[in-house]
Image (cartoon, coloured by chain):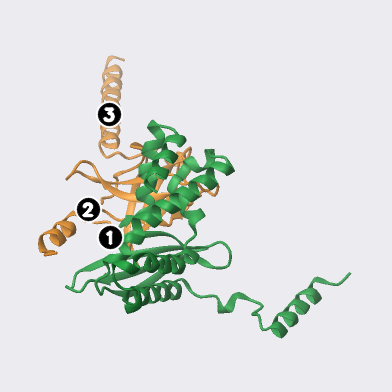
Chain colours: A green, B orange
Amino acid sequence: MIPIKHITSLALIINLLMGIPAFSQTEKKPDEIILAVVEDGIEILQDPTLAGAKNLIERQARIWQLLEPHFNLEEMSKRALGHHWRQRTPEERKEFITAFTSTLKRVYLGKTDTYRGERVDYIRTMMKGNRSKVQTYVYTANGDKFSIDFSLINNTNTWKIYDVTIEGVSIIGNYRSQFNSILNRSSFEKLMTDLRKKG
Amino acid sequence: MKKFDIELSVGLFISVGLLCIVYTSIQLGQVDIFNQKNYYPIKAIFSSVTGLKKDTNVEIAGVKVGTIKNIELENYQATVSMSIRKNIEIQEDAIASIRTKGLLGEKYIAITPGASDDLIGSNGTIFDTEPPFDLEGVIKHFVVDDE
């Protein structure tokens, strides 16, 4: 029987030899992730080869490709459904995640095309356990200022976004209130039908 | 004997009167001195609490579940201390929002329950919060925006 400390040392040596970091020291911080995503997103939106109405589908596909890995869509769906999530079966939860993701894509991907040279300034990061909130200000070309806070969760050793709060209004909080109101006077099936119709 | 009866009656009358004054003060001041053990303290951090006052309600689905005990500035953010009824469970992914009763009414905190199995215990903090809706700011953007 090999002692645990020897197994740890062995794993460390193997990882070093393979060039893989043994610990998540290279893991990006929440603010680094947000600022990198914003920068890459602006780059896509300003790419002349992707400009114009004829490149809309390609442009939005590239934006989604960039954004998707940074969003925890299961966590977002769970939080949007609130306490109703616990009453749903695993199959219903899966269906809901798919339908809710389509809704988010439809609603917010189209909005990226309204980019008019806004600048994003990082303010600060708040941390609490495996959650963090990155606070930013967005300055428009005519000098208006809007606050946008990104809420992130670290469930799988990577920080992923689970909510965005624009001018104090949480996207997930807003969906939670809407879904709660639908589910209190109607059924989960009705909510799914509505989501699929709109998604 | 007769004198003793009068003194006793006056004493009793004053005692009952004082008790009535104490009871009325507690009721009017909404001081919950007898039920403190039935509540637990939690906190929530907001970027702004404009218009929110101490001793106002904390509600879930429009039902009062607690009271705001204190509002302090910490690290340029507002920390709101609340007292929540012991039988009310608040999930760690619950959202605390500052809402207004009516269009121009008093501000209060509304908590929307979350999906998590982990609960916020005594002295815990609600991480996800929404500050009050800035109606003035929206009107300003609406009036100034020329697009």
**Measured Cα–Cα span from mark 1 to mark 2:** 17 Å
Q: Is residue B102 left or right of residue A18?
A: left
Q: Which residue is mark 3?
A: B20
Picture quadrant where residue A115 is located: bottom left
Q: Which residue is mark 2?
A: B51
Picture quadrant where residue A177 is located: top left
Residue at 24% x, 53% y: name it.
B133
Question: Mark 3 belongs to which amino acid?
Answer: Cys
Picture quadrant where residue B45 is located: bottom left
Q: Position of residue A119 (x, y in %)?
A: 28, 75
- Mark 1 near mark 3, Cβ–Cβ under 8 Å? no
The earlier-in-sequence mark between 2 and 3 is 3
Which callout, 1 or 2, points to the residue nearer the camera?
A: 1
Q: Position of residue A96 (x, y in %)?
A: 49, 46
**Seen from this angle, which residue lies furthest top?**
B2
Q: Are marks 1 and 3 on the same chain?
A: no
Q: Which residue is mark 1?
A: A167
- Up the image or down, A124 lies above or below B126; here it is below
Q: Position of residue A72 (x, y in %)?
A: 49, 59
Q: Is residue B23 visible?
A: yes
User: For mark 1, does the 10 Å Cα neighbourhood hold few (<14), some (14 to 19), or many (20 or more) residues?
Assistant: some
Given the image, what chain letter belongs to the residue carrying mark 3?
B
Question: Mark 1 belongs to which amino acid?
Answer: Glu
